[in-house]
Image (tube, grey):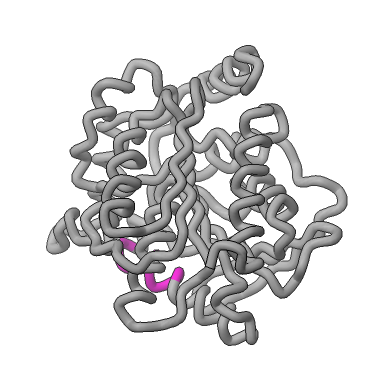
Amino acid sequence: MTDHREIDAIRALLSSKPRPVGWAERRHRIEEVGAAWPIADDIKVEAVELNGFSAEWSLAPGSDASHILMFFHGGGYCSGSIVSHRRLVTEAGRAAGARTLAVGYRLAPENPFPAALDDAIAAWRFLRGQGIKAEHIAIGGDSAGAGLTVSLINALLASGEALPACGWLISPWTDLTLSGTTLETKDAIDPLIHKGYLLELAEAYVPAHEHRKDPRVSPLYADLKGMPPLLIQVGSDETLLADATRFAAAAGEVGVEVTLEIWPRMIHAWPLWNAKLEAGRQAIVHAGNFVRRCINGAER
């Protein structure tokens, strides 16, 4: 699937500096690492200002502007941005043959739950207000953004609204109670995500009066019946591996069409480094094909 030297080089990049302390430093670091390689020259981007947060359109040559991949970045609800995920999002749009809308939702701890979910719903309303059909929209995200993807779809289900064509989840963080067994068993090999760090993020995102088992916070505990087709991609070397496998099982048990891909030797959100990682490019191609089929109606 990949030359081991490539993923080892990414691991070296991620460990080349001490782990940052403080929200400002963490936000700078994820942008620095995520934007290490710029977007392709042929991508057109356009900034959008929504009500209290930013978004960004992107379009690759030959893509259908009426088909949309809306993407929520990772970063534990406390960091990450349009900038940090621009390369991933724009290449995913190319693979899917769709226009993308990257959503820069408000971050905790300044804006705790439910701010991110409110912004996700607002971004969906913005797309629908543009006259774009629900079945021509795919929603995706990595890590916390993947959890936010599920929470948005659940909100649409609860309100009886039309649903997107599909959901794409990269290394999803689905359980903020932190009960997954791989938080322990994969701790020594995951270069990025550790239980103490996740606990800090969860405390920053979820107010003390809210329960972390709330399905809007931890979609593992949601009623997933009726969700559209889902593609879940996760690395074998992730502490969040159990968040993905348990969620896939929970969705599959209630009849959701789920494709689970566990990528050998891959680390958290590895498609971010697609510019220098063949497995990252392959994962994006897999996801693009999935999104394209769903949006084009082949799986509906």
Which residue lies at the image location 58% right of the left edge and 15% below the top edge?
A: 8
Q: Residue at x 62, y 17 (%)?
A: 9
Q: How many marks?
A: 0
**Location of residue 275 (image quadrant):** top right
For residue 82, which quarter of the picture?
bottom right
Question: Can I make out residue 24 in this image?
Answer: no
* Residue 278 in view: yes
Q: Is residue 116 magenta?
A: yes
Q: Is 197 drawn above or below residue 174 in the view shown?
A: above
> Compared with residue 233, is residue 63 higher up or lower down, i.e. above or below?
below
Q: Quadrant of the N terminus?
A: top right
**Foreground of the two, 258 or 146:** 258
Nearest the viewer among 120 and 162 is 162
Percent across and percent down for residue 282 are 65, 35
Main SS category, magenta section: helix
Where is 112 relative to 16, above or below?
Answer: below
Decide if residue 252 is on the left or right side of residue 47: left
In the image, 215 versus 296, the foreground residue is 296
**Which residue is found at the position 32% from the left and 59% from the top?**
255
Residue 1 falls inside the magenta stretch: no
Left or right of 275 in this view: 15: left
Residue 24 spot, x, y in % from top left: 46, 45
**Span highlighted in magenta in the image:** 112-120
Q: Is residue 142 above or below residue 210?
A: above
Is 153 in front, or is 270?
153
**Residue located at (23% from left, 35% from top):** 180
